[in-house]
Amino acid sequence: MYYRDFCEKNIKQGEYTKMPEEMAKFYQIATVLYDVMKTLFPSLKVDDETQRYAKEIERKKEQYEHYNILPLYAGMVKPAIMKLPEIEAAIRALRNVDNLPMPRVQSAPTIHDNIDMHEERIIKSDILDWLSSVFGFQKGNVANQREHLILLLANIDVRNKDLKNYHQLDTGTVEHLMDRIFKNYRSWCNYLHCKSNLNYPPRSDRQQLQLLYIGLYLLIWGEASNIRFMPECICYIFHNMATEIHGILYSNVHRVSGDIYRTETHGEESFLRNVISPIYQVLRKEAKRNKGGKASHSAWRNYDDLNEYFWSEKCFRLKWPMDTKADFFVHLDETKSAHERPNQVAAGNRKPKTNFVEVRTFWHLYRSFDRMWIFFILAFQAMVIIGWSPSGSPTAIFEEDVFRNVLSIFITSAFLNLLQATLDIILSMNAWRSLKITQILRYLLKFAVAAVWAVVLPIGYSSSVQNPTGLVRFFSNWAGGWRDQSFYNYAVAIYLLPNILAALLFLLPPLRRTMERSNLRIIVLVMWWAQPKLFIGRGMHEDMVSLLKYTLFWILLLVSKLAFSYYVEILPLVGPTKVIMRRKIHVYEWHEFFPNLPHNVGVVIAIWAPIVLVYFMDAQIWYAIYSTILGGIHGAFSHLGEIRTLGMLRSRFEAVPAAFSDRLVPSSKEEPGRIDVEADSSERKDIAKFSQMWNEFIDSMRIEDLISHRERNLLLVPYSSSKGSVVQWPPFLLASKIPVALDMAKDFKGTDDAELFSRIKIDDYMQSAVIECYETLKYILVELLSDPGEKLIIDQIGDKVSTSIQAQSFLTDFRMSGMPLLNDKLEKFLNLLLDDFENTVVQEAQIINVLQDIMEIITQDVMTHGHGILENSHSPHMDNRSDKKEQKFERININLVYNESWREKVVRLHLLLTVKESAINVPMNLEARRRITFFTNSLFMRMPYAPKVRNMLSFSVLTPYFKEDVLYSDEELNRENEDGISILFYLQNIYPDEWTNFEERIEDPKLVSVSKDKKELIREWVSYRGQTLYRTVRGMMYYRQALELQCFLEDAGDRAIFSGYRAEKKGTDHLQALADMKFTYVVSCQIYGVQKKSSQDRDRSCYNNILNLMLRYHSLRVAYIDEREEKVNGKPEKFYYSVLVKGGEKLDEEVYRIKLPGPPTEIGEGKPENQNHAIIFTRGEALQTIDMNQDNYLEEAFKMRNVLEEFVKRRRKQRKPTILGLREHIFTGSVSSLAWFMSNQETSFVTIGQRILANPLRVRFHYGHPDIFDRIFHLTRGGISKASKTINLSEDIFSGFNSTLRQGYITHHEYIQVGKGRDVGMNQISLFEAKVANGNGEQTLSRDVYRLGRRFDFYRMLSFYFTTVGFYFSSMVTVLTVYVFLYGRLYMVLSGLERSILDEPNIHSSKAALEEALATQSVFQLGLLLVLPMVMEIGLERGFRTALGHFIIMQLQLASVFFTFQLGTKAHYFGRTILHGGSKYRATGRGFVVFHAKYADNYRLYSRSHFVKGLELLILLIVYEVYGESYRSSKLYFFVTFSMWFLVASWLFAPFVFNPSGFEWQKTVDDWTDWKRWMGNRGGIGIQPEKSWESWWDGEQEHLKHTNIRGRVLEIVLAFRFFLYQYGIVYHLDISHHVTSFLVYGLSWVVMATVLVVLKMVSMGRRRFGTDFQLMFRILKGLLFLGFISVMTVLFVVCGLTVSDLFAAVLAFMPTGWALLLIGQAFRPLFGRIGLWESIKELGRAYEYVMGLIIFMPIVVLSWFPFVSEFQARLLFNQAFSRGLQISMILHGRKDTISS
């Protein structure tokens, strides 16, 4: 029978001969064959032998299922990885289960079984199987964690171990892994004062128990799904399950319940069902309360809240097995009342927040950083007091009265502390029910003590003041007999005691760290007042050296800041303020409500308010300055930029191989010292090893089309450098050296050898080239000739050369005049050797002819006695020749032309002889230059020495993917935009050299697979220049290529090293096995399963492209979330799985499938949830996070093992890093000026910025990818990101916060870099900035920022503030300063106070002080803070002349406009997020942006964030100019107001300046038509904002629908500022005749109301009569028009109205209408009920029309002039123009037909 024959031949015999992959296929075929046989022959009785075969196959099939890395059930033929001794030892340790009680399984009959009996079987495989049988873990989880644990143990155990006697795991290996995995668990037990359940009874097998505990933890973690974000919850689960293990093994009675432990097995999903699912359901219910990010944070519990439940002893109330009726699981609002809306959350039914409440308020900034604000406020108060003294000198503080006044700062401090205590109580109110009574007591006591000090200190101070007045007199009288001056001093001393103690502990960080980490109750009691006991955030203090470094940094900075503030901002204003406060003003130009206000307080506030804001903001400027200087110095000492040009590279290339061997080649322990005799061979071996890597690097750039064939040949280093007397340097160093030497020799007139040789030896590379050419030519000729006698002639010529040189008779024996002719013939000879002839006979004949000519030239023309050599030579083969001269050199070995090694020498010699121009510009491609110079420079930087591959840390790379581009399709490449431009055409013009190199490459069969057609190659070429998954995967797989090469260099002998990596057998099983052990790459394609099933073209394309990636890169793994519908009790239910697949022969193969408790991505933010579900499939001790827009380079991948050594490198205090920050290169900077700005900004942040954050400031966090995580540290502490909805929008930085709070340590390293793409269009960049600003707004509210701000020491807290949320707050304050300044001046101008006061002679000379102080703000506003680090970093790495040039070009390209515009983006979205929420992930898109954005698109995107604010500032400036011009004269006034006008212009017009074709007339016309259509379209349900103004307008108010009452009230209060215009301007109208009665203002409201009523009448008339009663409507309009004319006539003739009044009225009433509109939006529900909402909407539409027209008119005017469009194109694409590209052709679509 065929079935039995198949089984016998392929399965039974194959077990001993076939690999696991083949066996898996045979088992699948056999199973299918048996099923087919049963189907075809149902009545035929299958014989017993066949059934026996079928049962055996069914039983063994599991062993040959698809595996991930380790084929654990391989038969007799084991793959190389299974033969590694470390793998065998780890497997052996896990299979030690002989002494474990084996649970007996009762296998009940299933649906598919027809057997009505129970079968008992014994489970006996390994420790993880035993745990699975006891606790009911899933099969996929067990298989996944089995491989995970084996690889972990093997990689740790093999490190620095002798491989000769390798049989079992070291005890230390398992101990080490135990310590790392359970460090957090032990800390948790100590914190809760409960005994750890890691028990080791006497005489137990300790290693077995340890592996049981490790395996249990990993199995819990592997199946925990979303609960992996709750590490202490996992600790609780493990704690109880470890108790069960101990009970099963060593006790029979549960120590709590008294139940008997049973060893029956549980069902496969029982752990998921009984433990994980109940907790997941709590998470899911809480996530639903979030309402998609619209609900308040205080209305629901996020991941942190639920995890922190397990920080208290309350968690033990859950019991074990967990009681689902416990308070943690029960939701009181599960049963809703009948009248409750489905999406409503009842406030009274909410569970309390845990420990912290994220309330939307700016007070969080004060609460989190109270010490900083108190310091700045007290310093400001002290400086004002000193400045107010008669002398105004800082030395005035030593005067008694001044000093006494300065002491009043402690009263201010007391009130500020009272504010802090009050905020603690109010902002944590929603968490009080979850707090311990001790925490509540602490809050109340803190408040009480602060209140006492707020009373005692003022009383004490009043008693010490001589001749008290006012409020001080009141306190003084109340104090009665306490008039003792020393009382206040004693009170201050007592008040300062806690601060003194804190300062002492600050100076003793080890003591503070020990106390904070201690769980001793007495220490906790002592520390209770200083800070509440918390599981995290304890003992974060740095060592003394680090503390001194950042303390010194901040002391210098603060001294500079305070000195500047005192002398520039405060002191100049004191004198004018004194005069203003003394002056009495009785005449106002409006109705003044408070004419008798003392000291002109309004004017003082108007003048001082912007200065105060600048004072609090300018520390950010000083931080930028100091960090730039220090970052530059730090970078210089790190050797950055030492090789930054090709000239520098050539000058230091001789040292590169030695540096490579020193840094990137492991030191050999077998050769501890190298003796002098072997020095030369050792150097050559170093160069040979270097050449392997260097040539692979060069070849990778050739494959990437960065260099051409010719450039590759010039850059390659020969492998066989062992032969020859000189080192064979790459030809680009030796180019033109031979032609120059020939000319030198030809023109040399003397006869002294020494003189000629000395000239050649001056240039080392020339000497090397001459010797190498001679030796290579000799080698080629000897190898080519077949006749021994002819070879002897060559040897004799060589001997003659040697003896002539030794005898110094070279110029006598050889004629230099014959060398040029010889050179020409050699060139022809080498060309013939390299040419591809179809007819070998013809080629051989031509070669022989030229060879004979060469020998004749050598012997006759060059050598003076050369004919003698030919005559004296005899050969056995020449005896029978009739004409000896003609028959010489006729026999050659023509087959050598096909020998790669020999051919390589010919190519090299040809280059040396023929390249006559200098190779100074090789390579031409700028990216290739950058990579070569950075790599060689990095070899001279400080980095850990490389370990052997076997000893290196293993690591994984994880990339989250959603729906981004994988590989561009033909349609996408050739689809033309509105200008007729396709992506392909665009890239061909942007990268012309790379396109030329690509066309050259695809013609070379050695570099291109025959199976690929040109279209597919073009798709790949384009995709590798975009931000696609194809590019990312290619880059990351360089890690594996580098590992295989490193293994080869370590294991290969001298012969293999000198033969070359590619000449040897590449990719042997051993190399692949080691690479598999050390590296894993997982791409988390969340919706891969959906794309696989989808019928949509894009989804199918993405699926096929991802599949092709897996088929191309066999070590690539893809994880995805699979959704299946299955029937349960007859009802369909959805189930979710985490699935891992790999590439098979033609399709994907499923490796692991793990069931999830529910949809994982519904709980938190998408990206971290995507990472979390896939992290269980990663391996190793380190994990690199790589985003979809990143790239990698082979030469950088070679340094990965050095970077990983940072985790184990010795440091002070034995601190090991938990996150390694890496440098990034932004590869999108050459597309346009915007991309260049963004690239420079981002580059400066990821280099100089993070350099300073890491050292000395110690506040670097995780800012995205490509950081490397200590994987074991983070998998036991919540993962590599945080995922709570909305609050963790910037999920990456929270992993840095979490790592630091959990005593982690984050470093930054710049000797390695990873590529990264950035947004390149204006709208893309703005969306990105908005997303980051939103994220920072949410960070401000978070518990992580609060805890870091409160628990860092003072100086580290300053670093933290100014490098995170403080930067965005300072941006907002910068904008706010402009508002405060202009509104203050508006108040002074319109009230007449400015005229009255500033015309005072005493003030006239000092009134520039305000402008001087405000000049500081404009520095921030113009983006100069961002430019400073850019200039420093460019100067450091590319030279300061280049940096200066870049700075000038950036300014000419309006970089300041761009940065000023983005300042508005940051300020708007940061402020709105804190006030109202509404933050969300904004997809920016990663395509190529060269299209024109329509006016309507720009208007929608920037209307509220920029245009409205810009127009408001424009009106402010106009009013200020009109009403204050006649009496203003200040030199700095122009600079200050210019910066404000500049800000207005930038906010209003930057989107159009940076919009391609923004000023092209036809596009302007089309934009206007499109905008009018959009404005006129009606909205409604389902109408997108892009289609209708009404839908967009409604969406813009979304934040008001969900904001709290506090946010709504604040919106209304802020809207009241617009009433100031009307109030002030109406009194300046000519019609008012200088009357200041309040009646004037009242009449203006009558006019306003009349206008609104008329507009309402017209609107209602149009709706009601516009169609059916057209005549009546026309009559109505006519009457209104006549009425208007009549009224205006009366006003002009009778009341004295003027034309200027009409323009003034517009400035007065337009802001009033806008204020009414804002108030109406805030009261939308009310206006909706009374029927006025439609009127509000129409008023809004009218304002939008007016704003749109105002902004659009300048665009129209500029579009009239064609040169403006040309200038804009030059402005936008200057980088491309400088490279000679045809951008104008790209923009206008004038392109030639491109043949594909």
Image (cartoon, rainbow, N blue to C red):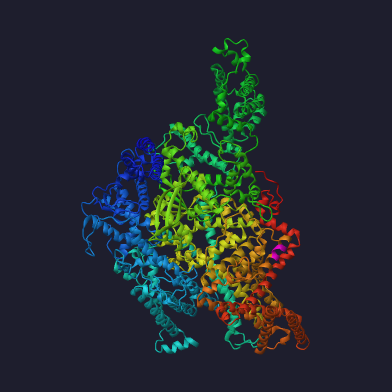
Q: Is residue 1355 left or right of residue 998?
A: left
Residue 1441's place in the image compared with 51, above or below, is: below
Q: Main secondary structure of the magenta part?
A: helix
Q: Nearer the viewer, residue 290 or 1510?
A: 290
Q: Which residue of the protein is positioned furthest toward the front in this rendering? A: 43
Count how many numbered circles sit on residues in the image: 0
Instruction: Residue 1500 in the image: state x and y as whole percent.
Output: 62, 67
Residue 543 visible in the shown view: no
Name the quadrant of the C terminus.
top right
Residue 14 picture quarter = top left
Q: From the image, which quarter does the N terminus lie in?
A: top left
User: Residue 1699 placed where, x, y %?
Assistant: 76, 80
Identify which residue is drawn at 34% across, 65% down.
515
> At 51% from the left edge and 65% from the top edge, which residue is drawn?
1336
Magenta segment: does it hold 1392?
A: no
Q: Is residue 129 left or right of residue 281?
A: left
Indicate the quadrant where residue 1580 lies.
bottom right
Give the percent coordinates (x, y) of residue 428: 42, 74
Q: Which residues are magenta?
A: 1564-1569
Name above or below for residue 1158 compared with residue 1742.
Answer: above
Question: x and y percent of residue 1300 in the render?
Answer: 42, 61
Q: Is residue 240 visible?
A: yes
Q: Nearer the viewer, residue 1351 or 1641?
A: 1641
Q: Is residue 746 above or below residue 1445?
A: above
Q: Nearer the viewer, residue 1301 or 11?
A: 11
Out of 264 and 1506, give the one closest to the viewer: 264
- Whether the magenta-drawn stretch holds residue 1567 is answered as yes
